[in-house]
Structure formats: C-alpha cells, structure tokens
Image (spheres, rainbow, N blue to C red):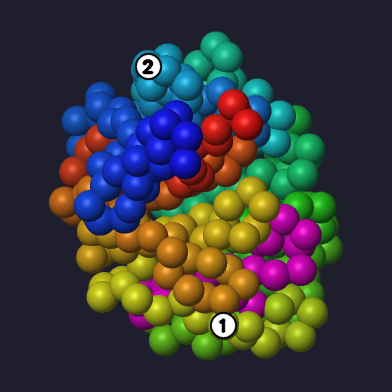
C-alpha cells in the first residue's frame, strides 16, 4: 500500500473505529443540553435546538457559530429546515416559531400552537406539521402562516412527525403506534403501524418513500414497509431507550441515539450494527446526517454538538 494511502487509512481507523474514536469536531456554545439537530439541504448550515431556550446556526464547514435565535421561553425540543433552506422551524412547550434563516427574524403562526414536540416541512415547503402534547398534529400553510387543519385521534402526546419525500403522506408517532395520514385530506391513509412496545420518539421516511423507520423507548428501531404495513426488521443493540434516529441521504445507513449515551450506526439492508460512537456522557437526543452523508451530528444533554466522520477519506492520487 502506498504511503499516502496508509496515512488515509490510519486516519480513518482512528476517527471512525467506533467507541475508541473521538468526534472530528465539537461545537460548543449552548449552556444546556441539545435536544434536536437539522442540516440545511445544501449542507452549509447545521441548526441545534437546546434546553437553554435558544436555536443556534452553525457553519457546517468551519464549525463557527453563525447566529443565535432567541425568542422561546422554554426548552427548544425540535428544529427543521425548509427544503430550500430559507426557513427554520423550532418547537417548544411555549410556542412554534418560524424563522428566516438568513436574517434570524421570526414569523408568527396562527393558532397559538404550544407543547410542540416535533416539526416537519413538506416538499417545496408548502406545508408545516407540528406534533403536539395535546395529542394532535397541526398543519399550516407555510406561505401565509394560516392554520390548515388539525389531525386528531392520537394517543395523549405526539412526539414525532415526518413527511414523505413527495409530501403526500405524513407519519406521526403517538404512544406505541405510528399513524399514516393524507395531510391534504386530513384522513388516515391506512391502519396504524403497530409493533413497538413503548413510546415512539422519532420517525423518518426512506428517500424513495416506500419505507419508514422509527425509534422507540422500547430500545429498538424498526423498518416498515408502507405498502403492506408489515415490519421489515428491528435494529436491536441499545441497552436503554432510543430518543432519536436519522437515515443517511442514500437510505443505506441508520443512526440512533439513546439514553445509554451512545450513537449507533446500522446497515439498513441487514440490521447489522456498523459503528458505536461513544463520545457522549449523557442521553443523546438528536442525530442528523449531512446531505452528502459524510458527517453525522449528534447532540446530548451534556451540551456540545459532536460531529463524526462516517465515510472513510478518499485517496484521490490513484
């Protein structure tokens, strides 16, 4: 093996060998734990929502703090970028806020939403969904800020929401089940997905919209076939409850963060655990892949955001 190639390989093993590796970068600035993370679609920015009541925007390349968004009175529980990256939504027990990502100015949404646990934009940012502590999913028109409809029939709290890539289907995690909705009609598309034995905390569609992944306090993540409603496989290995999951942009890898203070990386096709990142000392509440799939961000109750290299360096000399 050429000397340059050996250097790349050694660097990859040191950084990406799982628990013995360290994050490639730490983003420090929050004074309390990080609850949620989201990358902009162009990969330029990373947003973090924190228990310190702020949202921070970071330069994804340099790690520099770009802006702090202030306006919440309670812990920020969820953040999400619009597909074009121009807007950022943040949810808290006190409010749902819609921010202009460039200026940092907040827009008001009608309906006075509170106890927001999860947020998601539909394709081309036509619609915004919020999973709320009153057992509903609320929908807004992003352009006008006008409330559209309320989806009812959930368990006491909705903790997670996600739109399919085409925006025509909405998934919501409530209790142990996952509801599948037609957001335009406000009706359920099919029977709920059932199989988790404890609260569903996170959901995400596959890039082609045919599959759904979910993470639960029952210590498992699950992969679902949306055409049949059947469970395809379970990902088992965490010793405590799972708080957060994220699919890689190509849909081949799944990241999960847990109360056991670890972030695990799984092969979706087989359910095999690939990596075990052990750099946290508290519950992991947020994970997010960069749009190119090369970096995984994770945030926990300890405060800093960890950035992990999840793809080996490429030797371009041959």
Residue 175 seen from this side: no
Image quadrant where residue 274 sits: bottom left
The one of 196 and 152 positioned closer to us in this rendering:
196
The one of 93 and 314 positioned closer to us in this rendering:
314
| Residue 189 highlighted magenta (yes or no) | no
Image quadrant where residue 150 sits: bottom right
Question: Residue 227, how many percent across, how many down?
Answer: 79, 79
The circle drawn on residue 2 is none
Residue 231 seen from this side: yes
- Disc 2 designates what residue? 64
Whether residue 276 is situated above or below residue 65 in the rendered picture: below
Magenta highlight range: 205-224
| Residue 212 highlighted magenta (yes or no) | yes
Graded by Cα atoms within 10 Å as few (under 14), some (14 to 19) or many (20 or more), the crowding at tag 2 reads: some
- Kindly identify the residue that appears in the image at 71 percent across and 78 percent down: 225
Image quadrant where residue 86 sits: top right
Question: Residue 312, how many percent across, how many down?
Answer: 48, 43
- Disc 1 designates what residue? 233
- Kindly identify the residue that appears in the image at 32 percent across and 31 percent down: 25
Graded by Cα atoms within 10 Å as few (under 14), some (14 to 19) or many (20 or more), the crowding at tag 1 reads: some
Q: Secondary structure at mark 1?
A: strand
Whether residue 233 is situated above or below residue 216 in the rendered picture: below
The one of 22 and 210 positioned closer to us in this rendering:
22
Question: Residue 90, how many percent across, how many down?
Answer: 48, 38
Describe residue 36's horizontal placement relative to residue 163 as left or right. Answer: left
Structural distance between the alpha carbons of marks 2 and 1: 39 Å
Prevailing secondary structure class for the magenta stretch in the rendered image: strand
């Amino acid at each position: 093996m050429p000397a340059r190639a050996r250097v790349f390989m050694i660097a990859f093993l040191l950084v990406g060998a799982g628990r013995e590796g360290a994050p490639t970068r730490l983003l420090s600035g929050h004074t309390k734990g990080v609850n949620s993370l989201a990358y902009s679609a162009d990969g330029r920015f990373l947003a973090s929502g924190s228990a310190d009541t702020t949202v921070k925007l970071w330069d994804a390349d340099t790690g520099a703090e770009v802006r702090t968004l202030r306006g919440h009175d309670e812990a920020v529980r969820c953040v999400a970028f619009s597909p074009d990256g121009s807007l950022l939504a943040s949810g808290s027990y006190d409010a749902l806020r819609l921010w202009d990502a460039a200026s940092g100015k907040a827009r008001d949404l009608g309906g006075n939403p509170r106890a927001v646990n999860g947020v998601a934009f539909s394709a081309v940012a036509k619609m915004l969904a919020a999973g709320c502590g009153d057992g509903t999913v609320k929908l807004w028109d992003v352009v006008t800020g006008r409330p559209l409809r309320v989806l009812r029939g959930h368990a006491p709290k909705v903790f997670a929401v996600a739109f399919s890539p085409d925006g025509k289907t909405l998934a919501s995690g409530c209790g142990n089940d996952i509801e599948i909705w037609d957001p335009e009609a406000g009706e359920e598309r099919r029977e709920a997905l059932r199989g988790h034995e404890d609260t569903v905390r996170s959901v995400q569609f596959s890039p082609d919209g045919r599959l759904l992944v979910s993470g639960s306090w029952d210590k498992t993540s699950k992969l679902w076939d949306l055409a049949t409603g059947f469970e395809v496989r379970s990902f088992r290995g965490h010793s405590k409850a799972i708080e957060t999951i994220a699919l890689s942009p190509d849909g081949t890898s799944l990241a999960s963060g847990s109360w056991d203070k670890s972030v695990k990386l799984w092969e979706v096709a087989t359910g095999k655990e690939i990596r075990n990142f052990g750099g946290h000392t508290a519950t992991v509440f947020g994970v997010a892949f960069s749009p190119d799939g090369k970096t995984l961000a994770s945030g926990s109750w300890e405060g800093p955001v960890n950035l992990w290299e999840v793809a080996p360096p490429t030797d371009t000399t041959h």
